[in-house]
Image: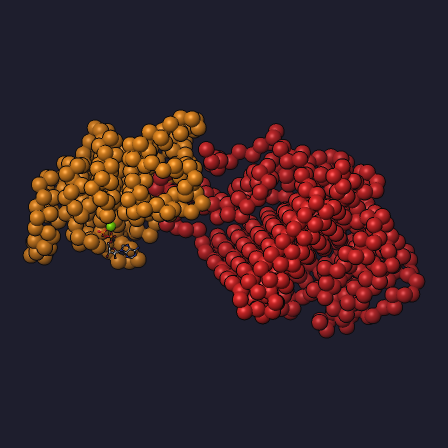
Chain colours: A orange, B red
Amino acid sequence: MLLNIKNLHVSINGKEIIKGLNLGVNKGEVHAIMGPNGTGKSTLAAAITGREGYEITQGEIWYKNKNIIGMPAEERANEGIFLSFQYPVEIPGVSMTNFMRTALNAQREYHELPAIPAGEFLKLMEEKKNLVEIHSKLNNRSVNEGFSGGEKKKNEIFQMAMLQPSLAILDETDSGLDIDALKVVAKGVTGLRSEENAFIVITHYQRLLDYIVPDFVHVLFDGKIVKSGGKNLALELEEKGYEWIKEQYHAGS
Amino acid sequence: MNGSKSSIMRVPDITNSPKVMENMKLLKEIPLGEMLIDRFQNQFDVITANDIPAVTAMRKEAMNHFISNGFPSSSDEKWRHTEIESLTEENFQYYLKPLDSEQDIEDLFKCEVHDFDTEIISLLNGWYVNKHAGLTTLPNGIVYGSLTNAMKLYPELFEQYYGNLADIQVNGFVSVNTAMVQDGVFIYIPDGVYAEKTIQIIKLIDKKEQLFVQNRNLIILGKNSSFSLMHCDDSINHFSSLINTVTEVYVGENAHFNLYKLQNLNNQSGLINSTFIHQEANSTTKSNTLTFNGGMIRNNINIDLQGENAHADVLGLYLMDKNQHVDNQIYIKHNAAHCTSNEKFKGILDDEASAVFNGYIYVARNAQKTNAYQNNNNILLTPKATINSMPFLEIYADDVKCSHGATIGQLDQEAMFYMRQRGISSSNARLLLMYAFTAEIINQISIEALRKRIDDMVKKRLRGELSVCEKCVLHCGSPDKEYHFEIDMSKI
Ligand SMILES: Nc1ncnc2c1ncn2[C@@H]1O[C@H](COP(=O)(O)OP(=O)(O)O)[C@@H](O)[C@H]1O
Ligand SMILES: [Mg+2]
């Protein structure tokens, strides 16, 4: 199993947000995580990627047969965990090129590979830019600064394509995108998808799942996965909303 | 006025013939101010040996001012956050003659900077290193050389310009400099001359004892001229020194002056750097003060915009750590209409470092359509680092645009995590953020070769690898020692 989360409890400032979550992801799979706002989807992503301030009070996160709790965020990234941020961060003064090259070389250094030659790097940039249909020059632009909402999301997928992760978590990458941008995101994912890697797609909407067909759909509610199913569960949620899930959950608890 | 200081300093009769000090060691046990007054009285002939009468008169007046006021102290409003007593109450040596160098002078000043062709002026322990006796005259008419030599050769220029900008009332450092200074740099750019080469003043302190050093620079830019000056303050050993420099610059009508100040002193040393700039109509000044190291640095930058349509950019960057302290005092006087000034200082403070920024904008009644902008941004890397940022606006005209702003923050934690999530180590992520923060100032350096060198220095400094260079700071960037940053910052 690529990722195996066992009985995970996560607190922020002493408040428990994730309350005993289990999730197993194998190589080659796409898992969709759905659920109402504020139920802990982004918190789960933060816990997997090793963000400070998210206190893991119980449970384990196994990734590539290692319990990664306590592993620094950059090491997790270099081990192939990638997060497409729900809110990509603007970094004025740090150029996209420089940022990307630093990231790529950090990863290569981690795997004891030499730094990428400038020419090769530029070629790779062009190739991946075309893939996600970024037409502007990135060289002189600061990371996400002045990017439109859609551009920011495309930029996340661009970075994913550059870094070729084994586990990519897409946190509402589809939110606020028009249908064309949505197709670009889907193309980025499809282009990367293989038997060797896996995706966790956090979304509110069924529509992205038309393009990225999930193997599993999970409903996250009140810090737990309360329902799992196949791709049809997403259709059902789209149709019926979350109320019935909530009712089921409250009736059960 | 400082009562406690004046009580120990009696007003001497400076017209008396000076006594000769038999043994300089006798002076060692007294604070700097007293020692200087004593020296002034006893060695008056030595100090004034090369003077024109106007300068001697100025010295007397300045010394009287110094005797009654002394050095500033932290009870003075303008020195409240800079505890200068820690230096002025020390015992320093002060020499009235150049010293023999303890190292090979040629070797000390070997400062080849790739792609950056400059005229180099060297001052060692405060004295002009007299490679070519007299003044240097370039084919385009530019004259430069030792201040003392210039005074002898161009007395009329000194009568007209010298001491007019550096107001002895400003503080004890300016008055004691005026009273006792014996050397420095003179630069004259004739009307209409566009100086292609930058002149670089390299000041080194290399003496194995505590030294008090004074310099005085006079720079005159004629009408329609253009000139860039680079002023490097370095120390090459780890003895403490206190440097007191006063620079006066006249920027003529439609002339353009660029000033780069590079400060990289050891942590035991102090530097009081007072720059007075006078601008005529349609002139521009761009001043860039880059402070990398130094125990206690005080920059006073006074700019008088005296003619219409004059413009001043006053920029600065300070990167301080340990117990270093930097205090930038900027005073911009809008005395004519349609002038603009733009102040921007940025700083990163680590460990227990502290900084002061004081931007004062004065707009006279007739200075309508003034546009004055002031900004100071700081990043504090530790809870113990401190910054005092204070804007002052004094405005008498009614049709003006003035703005000021100050920010104090930490490194953006969201950005830190974003970068680390991409595999970038936290130390490199910090570096990238700090470097990005400095870029706004560095990018303003218009001489490309210089910008690259400074850029290298900033990277080195941010990595904690730039302490005090063994030689001229710019040496760090010479081609055979090209500095490679782990993160390639070049835009490709
Ligand atoms: N940094 C934070 N500090 C305090 N509470 C937070 C923080 N981040 C998230 N929360 C809280 O945790 C809960 C889950 O948030 P989140 O994981 O962002 O939900 P989702 O992504 O499912 O919309 C919410 O109640 C939210 O208010
Ligand atoms: Mg969320």
Whether residue A6 can be seen here: no
Q: Is residue A131 above or below residue B59?
A: above
Quadrant location of the N terminus of chain B? bottom right
Q: Which quadrant would residue A165 be assigned to in this image?
A: top left
Q: Count the marks: how many?
A: 0
Q: Which quadrant would residue B181 be assigned to in this image?
A: bottom right
| Residue at the right extreme, as displayed | B17
Residue B398 point in image, percent of width and height: 54, 69
Kindly identify the residue that appears in the image at 68 percent across and 62 percent down: B85
Q: Identify which residue, B392 or B88, lies in the foreground.
A: B392
Kindly identify the residue that appears in the image at 57 percent across and 44 percent down: B445
Kindly identify the residue that appears in the image at 79 percent across and 49 percent down: B147
Q: Identify which residue, B63 or A11, lies in the foreground.
A: B63
A82 sits left or right of B470 in the view:
left
Residue A215 point in image, percent of width and height: 14, 36
Q: Identify which residue, A125 or B154, lies in the foreground.
A: B154
Q: Is residue B128 above or below residue B296?
A: above
Q: Identify which residue, A63 or A188, lies in the foreground.
A: A188
Kindly identify the residue that appears in the image at 83 percent across and 42 percent down: B134
Residue A8 point in image, percent of width and height: 22, 47
Residue B465 point in image, percent of width and height: 56, 41
Whether residue B140 can be seen here: yes
Q: Is residue B491 above or below residue B280?
A: above
